[in-house]
Amino acid sequence: MEKDMKNEEIPEINQGILVAEFEYIAQTAFQANEDRARASEFFLISFGTLLAAVLTTQFGDVETRFLYRLFIVLFTVVGVWGALTVLQLCRLRQAWLESVRAMNAIKDAVIAKSPETAGYFRWRTGSIPRAYKPWSVGFLLALQVSMVSGIALGAAFALLMAKVGYIPWIFIGVSILVVLSYLVFLYYLPLRKFDKGA
């Protein structure tokens, strides 16, 4: 009889652990989504603040060559910062998907024991969204950051050319598109590898 009581208690303990694990995983998935929004907002707000600070500063006696150098450095830093933000958005997408996969492992175990519950779950292991999903919110955030970074690096290139005395506008436009494309690819590549590794 003691053996029977112990055997009855074990599923309750396991169920409690599974519930706690599921809640923890759900919290990490939620946190990854929140962090994605914060990362892109932080980048855009910081860039806007930097731009506003530069535009409202009085540069009376400052040498023009120094200002060009300063703006080139600032816009280059913004471009590199944008690349890091895109990588951060990519990693947060991967973290969210890891959480979703972990949640689905628990769902699969529940469905295996109680097949009648299968209809209650929208996402199952086979229907998890792909890591790289064009036009998802995560992709659009990465695209937004990539655009701002492209414009910042294009502005740095324009200032560098203005310092020389010649501004090839077509090359500046091309440089913006190249940086934009590169950063979107930087977001795309790790996520495609993540999909293939699943």
Image: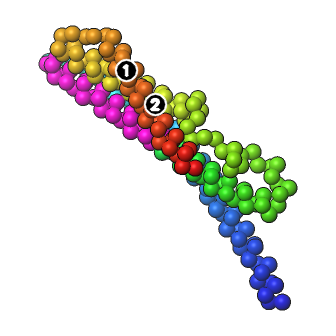
Q: Nearer the viewer, residue 5 or 117?
A: 117
Q: Is residue 108 left or right of residue 60?
A: right
- The disc placed on residue 16 is none
Residue ID at (80%, 52%): 118
Q: Is residue 71 magenta?
A: yes
Residue ID at (25%, 10%): 167
How dense is the environment of label 2, judged by Cα within 10 Å: few (below 14), some, or many (20 and up)? Answer: many
Q: What secondary structure is found at the residue carrying circle 2?
A: helix
Looking at the image, how many numbered discs can be counted on the residues? 2
Secondary structure of the magenta portion, mostly? Answer: helix
- Find residue 95 and report its horizontal and vertical position in percent: 53, 49
Q: Is residue 190 left or right of residue 175?
A: right
Q: Is residue 74 magenta?
A: yes
Tell me if residue 7 can be seen.
yes
Tell which residue pokes out farthest to the right in this image: 116
Q: Is residue 137 left or right of residue 182?
A: right
Q: Is residue 196 above or below residue 72?
A: below
Q: Which residues are magenta?
A: 62-90
Q: Quadrant of residue 17?
A: bottom right
- Identify the residue under disc 1: 176
Residue ID at (61%, 58%): 24
- Identify the residue under disc 2: 184
- Find residue 175 and report its horizontal and vertical position in percent: 34, 20
- Find residue 76 and report its horizontal and vertical position in percent: 29, 29
Q: Which amino acid, mark 1?
A: Ile
Tell which residue pokes out farthest to the front in this image: 196
* Among the two numbered marks 2 and 1 on one chain, the one whose residue lies closer to the N terminus: 1
